[in-house]
Amino acid sequence: MRRFLPRPPGSLRRRLVLGATVLATVAVLVSQVIGYAVLHSWLVDRVDQQLTDFHPPDPAYFDAARGGVPGERLGFLPSDFRVYFYDASGRRMDRSLGADDRPGPRIADSVPRLGLRDGHPETVDAVSGDSRWRVLPSSGPDGMHAVVALPLDTVDGATSKLLWLNAMLLTVAVAALLALGRWVVRLGLLPLTRMEHTAERISAGQLDLRLPDTDARTEIGRLGGVLNSMLERLQQALREREASEARMRRFVADAGHELRTPLTVIQGYAQLALRRARLSADEQSEAHQLIAQNAERMGLLVNDLQLLAQLDREPSYENAPVDLLSLAADAVRTAALHGTSHPVDLGPLPDPAGNDELVVVEATGDPHRLRQIVENLLSNARLHTPSGTPVHVRVGATGVSADTCGADRPGRTSASPPLPHGTPVGVLEVADEGPGLAARNAKHVFERFYRADLSRSRSQGGSGLGLAIAAAIAEGHGGRLELDTAPGQGCTFRLVLPARPPDGRTDGAPR
């Protein structure tokens, strides 16, 4: 069973070296084969040209026919040539021209058995030994024939030496390719090796390290850039998870703290109320009243927690036109009923053109939830500013930019991402002339259970969930809630929502 399992692949360096060597070897071998074939063909063509250019003279035929020595009247014969004569009946004669001690070509004794065509040279073996001959039949006078032959010893010798030379060159080339290819591949993969060592250190826990080779002109550099981006995202995800876990632990601790206080009060006064015999009627009434107040406080906290869980899980909002000006006017009217400790006025957004008229600004969303945001902002202004501090509610329409709203800038805080630059938006501001907030406190105002007072006293506000709920509702409507503040300059909370187009369609409709 084991022998049928596929062998694991070798290292990338080994595969590259072997692959390059095999390809180069094949290229060299093909070039050698082509060179060998060209040289052999050229040499054979020269022999064929010699055979074609030589024609036995007629006297040689006559000498062979009468039994004499063929060509004795010629006086000379080209070297290495052999000429075999056949009489008119097609039988080979005993006499031949140019005979020596070397074994001649193996040819038939009669013309019909030759199997050769006039004017077409052929290669035949020698009568004995490993020699080969190139032969060419030709016709003579009086129906006679002749076969002219030339040995291929020069051709075979040249090609044999070329084969040995090619074999040695191929061996040297393969050895050089292995050695040089290994060095070149190692040099080429050096950035990948550095990446490997860096990755090992990163996997060992050094998460701040990054891959060193990120040259976008090379494949390895582009790979390093992509891996570095991936590492950045992974590290960011780890930071976000750690921050989320820290927020969850703080959230649980804050929720436990907020619930423990009313529960302790309820438990204490409940035990006190059980001792009716020792309490007067006024003391019993006070205990019952405190129990009811703390139960109501705990119920409000639980309702806020349930609302936050709903907004985080599957928020559902109405999708209806909302007049932000009417919404602000109703909220200002309701705030006036709570007392005159903080004068509240309604006006337009500051306009560089000097237009100070209130206009109708429409958005799309859930009127009840948006009204909840405005009431929360007004309540927050009353609770966190001294008595008599003016509060200004402003309504208007503008476009997203760092100078107006919807985009991030120094001194501005938001729990939601910025909106696309230039997006038409409707804006509802709640600004106070109070002491403002320091930057270290402003960046936490939208966190759950956060209160700037370190004593966690409820005399300066609720449980710290109001702004978190308001920010979640604003983001759920495709907008955001942001804060501009500085010490001594008051706080300006700004609800930014995508404006409703005239045709009634919405961009960034609420989820």
Image (cartoon, helix red, strand yellow):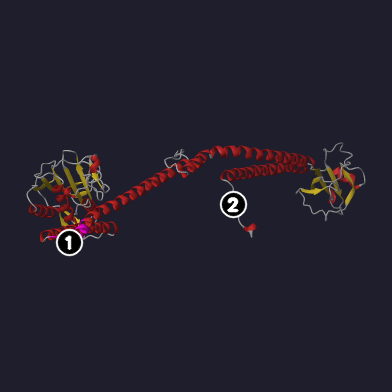
Q: Please tell me how crowded label 1 is: few (under 14), some (14-19), or many (20+) other residues with Cα within 10 Å.
A: some
Residue 179 x/y as whole percent: 63, 38
Residue 273 magenta: yes
Marks 1 and 2, Cα distance to the nearest angstrom?
A: 80 Å
Q: What residue did someone put label 2 on?
A: 8
SS assignment for the magenta stretch, majority? helix
Kind of residue sitting beneath label 2 = Pro
> Which residue is painted at 49% across and 43% down in the image?
200
- Label 1 or label 2, whichever comes before in sequence order: 2
Q: Nearer the viewer, mark 1 or mark 2?
A: 1
Residue range in magenta is 265-279
> Which residue is painted at 73% across and 41% down in the image?
163
Left or right: 263 with respect to 174?
left
Q: Is residue 504 visible?
A: no
Residue 411 x/y as whole percent: 22, 40
- Determine the secondary structure under disc 1: helix
Kind of residue sitting beneath label 1 = Ala
250 vs 185: above or below: below
Residue 225 magenta: no
Q: Is residue 6 visible?
A: yes
169 vs 364: above or below: above
Residue 113 x/y as whole percent: 83, 55
> Which residue is painted at 84% across and 38% down in the image?
77
Q: Nearer the viewer, residue 384 or 77?
A: 384
Quarter of the figure that contains the C terminus: bottom left
Q: Residue furthest front?
A: 278
Residue 212 x/y as whole percent: 46, 38
Left or right: 292 with respect to 155?
left
Image disc number at residue 273: 1
